Image (spheres, rainbow, N blue to C red):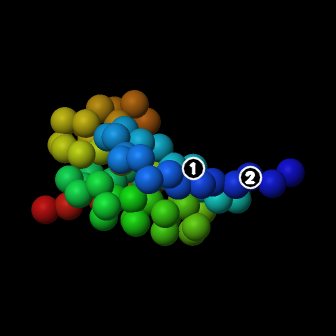
Amino acid sequence: MTIEVRRTNAPMEPGTYRAALGAPRGSLVLCEVDSRIAADLMDEAARAGIDTTWCRNGAETLLAVGAGAPDVLIMAA
């Protein structure tokens, strides 16, 4: 079985989830205002085997972390 992930040109929405390519090696919650930066980081994390959830602000991040603690939390300043 092959899993293929394609990125569209549609803008990402907060709460976007990108699954790891291959077997997941961990989870990440990313808090970043800029959707372009978030998309690039999520693509790299997916290639490294990390499931990622993107949040645009601290409130969304608190909700995401409360729903399930990630292995890593990245907050942009």
Q: Secondary structure at mark 1?
A: loop
Can you see residue 40?
Answer: yes
Q: Which residue is mark 2?
A: 3
The image quadrant that residue 41 belongs to is bottom left
Q: Residues within 10 Å of mark 1 (few under 14, many from 20)?
A: some
Q: Residue at x 34, y 40 (%)?
A: 13
Kind of residue at badge 2: Ile
Can you see residue 69?
Answer: no
- The residue closer to the viewer here, 47 or 72, is 47
11 over 62 or under it: above or below: below
Return the x and y of residue 26 as percentages of the image width and height.
Answer: 54, 56
Along the horizontal axis of the image, is 13 left or right of 58? right
Q: Image quadrant for the C terminus?
A: bottom left
In whole angstroms, how far apart are the C-alphas of marks 2 and 1? 10 Å
Q: Residue at x 53, y 55 (%)?
A: 7
* Mark 2–mark 1 CB contact (< 8 Å): yes
Q: Residue at x 65, y 59 (%)?
A: 21
Q: Give the mark nearest the N terminus, 2 or 1.
A: 2
Residue lying at the far left in this picture: please name it: 77
Q: Which residue is mark 1?
A: 19
Return the x and y of residue 62 as percentages of the image width and height.
Answer: 25, 37
17 over 20 or under it: above or below: above
Q: Residues within 10 Å of mark 2 (few under 14, many from 20)?
A: few
Query: Which circle, 2 or 1, is nearer the viewer?
Result: 2
Return the x and y of residue 65 as percentages of the image width and height.
Answer: 34, 39
In the rendering, which numbered label is found on residue 49? none
18 over 77 or under it: above or below: above
Kind of residue at badge 1: Ala
